[in-house]
Image: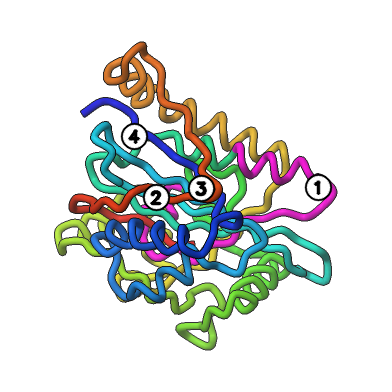
């Protein structure tokens, strides 16, 4: 399999309740094969009916039209350190055969840039409570600045305060009252013991750092993660991704799609796709 998955962007904040319900059921059919710990009602409220300022969800389909994954982007307007701030939170899950075969990150960064350009004077950041090493490894590899990070084990008091304020603001309880970084999320990634051992014994410094900081990820604990955002950092992340994935994307672009061009995502602000069940899935990530 070499082709890119086909993507559709749903402006969920503009969708009717009935269309949201159809979309939520489609997504949960894939989500339930990736995660445990969240029933349908909880998933619908957390991923689709989030009380955010804006929500966009990117769905991924294979050439046959079957749903193979999703990525949701939620933008919240809130106060951070007494100043107005826009906070991006995300969730994602993709079937194993299609992981790394899409441009979701590119479209997500473009969306983030467009939102930032509307109010460049406003403070922006990304906040996540990451429940799997793959999520943290991915973000730490492409984001120019990430807190906490293996190369900066001492977190400045101000940054720790931001992490604590964001986690508390989103209602995430501490696992250990003495540790502000690890929070109760209850999204449990379904994986074999062999897969789990591979992550625990990884040689990657960022992966090992995550496992050290959040040993309870296998029971749904999440590591609070803060990424400051501005136009320059968005561009740097985009360049890192395109350079790092150049080989994979080239093979997908020129080896599997007619004419050597990927399908551009379409926008469906008021409708959801027909319900289709996905195939067995691999890990994803909540935010």
Q: Which residues are magenta?
A: 110-138
Q: Disc 2 designates what residue?
A: 70
Please provide percent x and percent y for residue 207: 38, 54
- Mark positioned earlier in the residue sequence (2 or 3): 3
Residue 131 painted magenta: yes
Q: Disc 1 designates what residue?
A: 119
Q: Is residue 147 visible?
A: no
| 21 lies above or below 232 | below
Quadrant containing the N terminus is: top left
Name the element at disc 1: loop
Name the element at disc 2: strand
Left or right: residue 25 versus residue 177 is left
Distance Cα–Cα, label 2 vs label 4: 11 Å
State the residue lying farthest toward the top.
259
Binning the other alpha carbons within 10 Å of mark 3 as few (below 14), some (14 to 19) or many (20 upward) gives many
- Mark positioned earlier in the residue sequence (2 or 4): 4
- Give the mark toward the camera: 3 or 4: 3
Q: Disc 4 designates what residue?
A: 5
- Mark positioned earlier in the residue sequence (3 or 4): 4
- Mark positioned earlier in the residue sequence (1 or 3): 3
Name the element at disc 3: strand
Tell me, yes or no, whether the two marked residues, 1 and 3, touch with CB atoms within 8 Å: no
Q: Disc 3 designates what residue?
A: 10
Q: Is residue 190 visible?
A: yes
> In the image, what residue occupies the spot 41% across and 17% down?
261
Please provide percent x and percent y for residue 84: 81, 63
Front residue of 142/152: it is: 142
Residue 74 painted magenta: no
């Amino acid at each position: 399999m070499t082709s890119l998955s086909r993507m559709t962007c749903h402006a969920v904040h503009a969708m009717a309740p009935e269309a949201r319900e159809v979309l939520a059921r489609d997504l949960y059919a894939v989500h339930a094969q990736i995660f445990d710990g969240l029933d349908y009602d909880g998933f619908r409220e957390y991923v689709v009916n989030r009380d955010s300022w804006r929500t966009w969800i990117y769905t991924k389909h294979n050439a046959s039209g079957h749903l193979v994954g999703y990525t949701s982007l939620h933008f919240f307007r809130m106060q951070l350190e007494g100043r107005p701030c826009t906070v991006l939170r995300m969730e994602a899950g993709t079937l194993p055969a299609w992981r790394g075969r899409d441009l979701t990150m590119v479209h997500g960064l473009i969306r983030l840039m467009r939102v930032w350009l509307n109010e460049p004077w406003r403070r922006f950041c990304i906040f996540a409570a990451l429940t799997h090493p793959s999520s943290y490894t991915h973000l730490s590899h492409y984001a120019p600045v990430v807190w906490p990070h293996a190369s900066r084990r001492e977190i400045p008091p101000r940054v720790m305060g931001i992490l604590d304020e964001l986690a508390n603001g989103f209602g995430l309880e501490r696992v250990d009252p003495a540790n502000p970084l690890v929070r109760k999320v209850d999204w449990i990634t379904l994986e074999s013991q062999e897969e789990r051992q591979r992550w625990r014994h990884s040689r990657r410094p960022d992966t090992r750092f995550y496992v050290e900081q959040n040993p309870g990820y296998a029971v749904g604990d999440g590591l609070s993660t803060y990424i400051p955002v501005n136009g320059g950092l968005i561009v740097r992340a985009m360049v890192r991704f395109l350079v790092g994935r150049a080989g994979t994307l080239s093979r997908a672009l020129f080896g599997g799609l007619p004419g050597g061009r990927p399908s551009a995502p379409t926008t469906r602000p008021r409708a959801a796709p027909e319900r289709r069940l996905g195939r067995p899935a691999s890990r994803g990530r909540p935010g």
